[in-house]
Image (cartoon, rainbow, N blue to C red):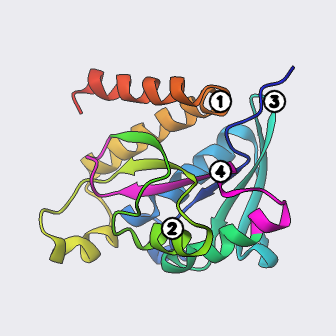
Amino acid sequence: MATEPSFRLVAGLGNPGAEHARTRHNAGFWLADALAREYGGTFRVESRFHGELAEITVAGQRLFLLKPSTFMNRSGRALQSLLAFHKLPAAQLLVMHDELDLPAGTVRLKVAGGHGGHNGLRDVHATIGPEYRRLRIGIGHPGHKDQVLDYVLHKPSAADEKLMRESIDAAVAALPLALEHWDKAVQQLHSREAENGN
C-alpha cells in the first residue's frame, strides 16, 4: 500500500517582478523554480489562486507547486485559496521561505511553530493558522534588526548566493524522502549541516 505523502501543496514565498528576482527574500521562489526544473513542471498564471501554479510528480506523488503573486506580506491569500479548492488541510502544505536565523548555506525542515517576525509567514498564520510544514532557507542576519528590511530586499553577495544555491540543491534532493519519511529527511539535512560546519 502506498504511503500517504507528508504534503501535497508546496509553496515558495517571494515577491513578484524582475526587480525582486535575485533578492534574499525570494529564496522560496528560487527553490520553487529549482523544483520545477528538476521535475519538469511549467508555471502558469492562475488568477483564481493569486499566483503561478505548476504540477510536478515526485516519488510517484502529484504535487501542486505555487508561487504567490500577492507580494510577501499577503502570501496567505494565495495559499488559502488553493488549499480550499483542493479541500486540503493546512498540514498538507509545505511553505519554503528565507530564514534570517539560519546562516547562508543552511536549510532545515520544521513542522508548525511561530512566524519569527517573517512577514510572509505572519500572513500565512493569520489566514490558515500555524499548523503547516516549513522548509527554511538560511540567508544569514545583517546583525541588527534595523538593517533587516534593506538586507532581505537586496541581492546576496556572490559567496552567500553560492551557499544559498547549494542549500537549495540539497533541499531538492531531500524532497522525495520528505514526502514519505519526513523525519529521515530532517536528519539528512541536519547531517549535511554538520558536515559543512553549520
Q: Nearer the viewer, mark 2 or mark 1?
A: 1
Q: Residue at x 58, y 46 (%)?
A: 34
Which mark sits nearer the N-terminus, 3 or 4?
3
Image coordinates of residue 57 in percent, x first then y, are 79, 38
Mark 2 or 1, nearer chain start: 2
Q: For the residue labelled by badge 1, is the local secondary structure a helix, a strand or a loop?
A: helix
Earlier residue among tags 1 and 4: 4
Of the two numbered discs 2 and 4 on the same chain, state the one appearing first in sequence: 2
Q: Which stretch appears magenta? A: 82-105
How far apart are labels 3 and 2 at the CA level?
27 Å
Left or right, residue 197 beside residue 79: left
- The x and y percentages for residue 95 are 56, 55
Mark 1, residues whose alpha carbon is within 10 Å: few (<14), some, or many (≥20)?
A: some
The disc labelled 4 sits on which kind of residue?
Ala
**Residue indicated by mark 1:** 176
Whichever of callouts 3 and 2 sits on the residue coming sooner in the sequence is 2
